[in-house]
Image (cartoon, rainbow, N blue to C red):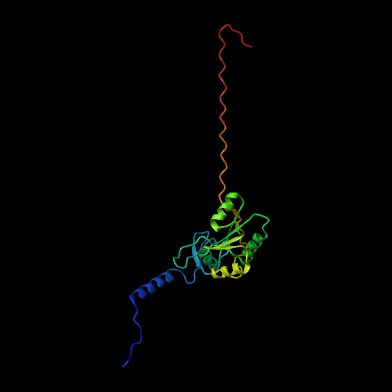
Amino acid sequence: MTTNTTLPIRRPALRAAVAVMAVLTALPAAALYKVVGPDGKVTYTDRPPTPASGRISPVNARTGAAEPDAVLPLELRQAAGRFPVTLYTAPSGCEPCDDARALLRKRGIPHVERQVLSREDSDALQKLTGGREMPVLAIGGQQLKGLTPDTWNSYLDLAGYPRESRLPAGYAFAAPQPLTERPAAAAAPAAKPAEPPAAEATPAPGSFRF
């Protein structure tokens, strides 16, 4: 007598497995990049293409849709998507701020830097972090006040960022921006159009005009 030891497959689990297989078969195997060549031809590849290959877009492994940030490796894009990094600094005379920036750049952490340049910026920092101390590192919703390299690196590890830089050659970090938006300069009043010269009066007959 043969005993059947196969466990029955529950219908929800079966449906989930079918859905996963449908997503996986919708794309070429291990395709991470979608490349649109100059001739409009679309190809998929698992290797980072060169800029000369055409318009490059990373592929979302779940949806198959092209993602906008084409320069970052998959591991970095996933970490930055879940836990974006923002660095709050002072513009000058802040050595810990310089060291914090250097730490992120050496480790290859894509980030946005916001600087406190005005009283409005300082007030905004107070509302965001509960203080005016700098630097402040935000990793997703986690805020780390003051530079402590070991602590910062530990939180970056937990967020899934690589320990060593994986940024592609030639990657350029964005320039720091003010924490708050600057009011647009008031528009200069429009110049009043010149009035046309007054028409000369026609002299009366028999009169003299000098």
Residue name at image x 39 percent, y 71 percent: 19
Q: Quadrant of residue 194?
A: top right
Say above or below: 208 vs 65.
above
**Where is residue 101 drawn, in percent x and y?**
63, 61
Furthest-left residue in view? 1
> 14 left or right of 118?
left
**Where is residue 58 drawn, in percent x and y?**
51, 64
> How many labels were placed on the picture?
0
Say above or below: 187 vs 152.
above
**Where is residue 116 drawn, in percent x and y?**
61, 53
> 20 left or right of 90?
left
Residue 71 vs residue 173, the one in the foreground: 173
Furthest-front residue in view? 131
Residue name at image x 57 percent, y 47 percent: 182
Residue 116 vs residue 50, the one in the foreground: 116
Residue name at image x 33 percent, y 75 percent: 11
Residue 7 vs residue 21, the one in the foreground: 7
Q: Quadrant of residue 165?
A: bottom right
**Where is residue 133 drawn, in percent x and y?**
61, 58
Residue 106 vs residue 210, the one in the foreground: 106
On-image quarter of the N terminus: bottom left
> 6 left or right of 94?
left
Furthest-top residue in view? 206
On-image quarter of the C terminus: top right
